[in-house]
Amino acid sequence: MAKITDKIEVLIQPVIEDMGYELVGIEYVASGKHSILRVYIDSEQGIGLSDCETVSRQLSSIFDVEDPITMPYNLEVSSPGIERPLFHIRHYQRFLGSDIALRLLRPINGQRKFKGVIGSVSEKDNSIELMTNIGSHKLDIDLIEKANLIAHF
């Protein structure tokens, strides 16, 4: 069974691209009447508040008709920011060699949270190699619950 975010992505990706933006990814945080649907967009010119407002209005209209989430929720449209979330294999490929923090859906050897550098990406295996201070870990992308770039200042 497809995740709600997968269904929403299929619904909104063409619309966002037609508007001249890239759909970076979608997060859905189910929390009863306080649920949040977060949509990350980007463009070569960057993203400003007016871009988020424009996309939010368009998506709200689509969701009013299609009703992909039957429970109450708040829609947030945002830029990916400096600690950009990674959703798809193409994101890991784009940021090969970058520092990331990630959390797995279930632990591997008792560990769910990792920090390290993306050492390699395998489309064939749908996996990444994460280089950490305690060695390298081959991680299936489908087991990654959340991943973000780590900003260095």
Image (tube, helix red, strand yellow):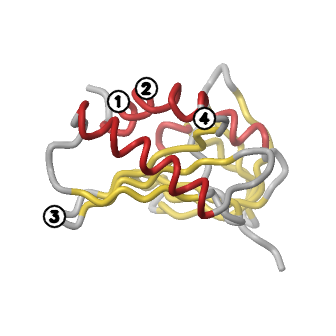
Q: CA distance from mark 1 to mark 3?
A: 21 Å
Label 3: how many Cα within 10 Å (few below 14, some 14–19, many 20+): few
At 43% from the left edge and 59% from the top edge, which residue is drawn?
76
Mark toward the start of the polypeptide (2 vs 4): 2
Q: Amino acid at mark 3?
A: Lys
Q: Residue furthest top?
A: 124
In front of the other: 49 or 89: 49
- Depth check, mark 4 against mark 1: the one in front is 4
Circle count? 4
In the displayed structure, 100 sits above or below 61; it is below
Mark toward the start of the polypeptide (4 vs 1): 1
Q: Amino acid at mark 1?
A: Lys
Residue 10's disc is 2
In front of the other: 98 or 33: 33
Left or right, 61 with respect to 81, comes to left
The residue singled out by tag 1 in the image is 7
* Residues tagged 1 and 2 counted as in contact (Cβ below 8 A): yes
Placement of the N terminus among the 4 image quadrants: top left
Label 1: how many Cα within 10 Å (few below 14, some 14–19, many 20+): few
